[in-house]
Image: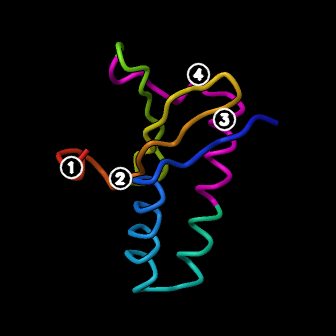
Amino acid sequence: MRRYRLSGPARADLRVVWKAIAHRSQARADRFLDELAVRFQEIADRPRAPGSKDIMYDSGCRIHTVCEFVIFYRAQDDGAEIIRILEGLDDLRFW
């Protein structure tokens, strides 16, 4: 099993995601973060799998979507670095 690492901004994004969902249901927010962790591991295990896309050819940055969230990551020799987790395209201006 390969490893994934979360960047500092990605860790901050997870807190924002949790808070956005938790205002309706903390249990649902917890389950969604668990689902994201599963997706992060899938990305680390197969960073070039179908469903992920290159977005900036020179940077090696790729994306994978989960519901309305976009996971930005880079493939690494031993897995993947999760760079950001943003909601939809509206948040891209902050990336």
The residue singled out by tag 1 in the image is 94
* Residue 64 falls within the magenta-colored stretch: no
**Label drawn at residue 48:** 4
Marks 1 and 4: which is nearer the front? Answer: 1
| Total residue callouts | 4
Q: CA distance from mark 4 to mark 3?
A: 9 Å
Residue type at mark 2: give it: Leu
17 vs 27, left or right, is: left
Mark 2 → mark 1, Cα distance in angstroms: 9 Å
Q: Viewer-nearest of labels 4 and 3?
A: 3
Asked if the residue under mark 2 is in contact with the one under mark 3, i.e. CB atoms within 8 Å, the reply is no
Q: Earlier in the sequence, mark 4 or mark 2?
A: 4
Instruction: Check whether the beta carbons of the residues at disc 2 and disc 1 lie within 8 A of each other.
Output: yes
The amino acid on which the numbered mark 3 sits, given as a three-letter code, is Ala
Q: Give the distance between the C-alpha atoms of the residues marked 3 and 2, in whole angstroms.
A: 18 Å
Could you tell me how far apart the alpha carbons at marks 1 and 4 are, in whole angstroms? Answer: 25 Å
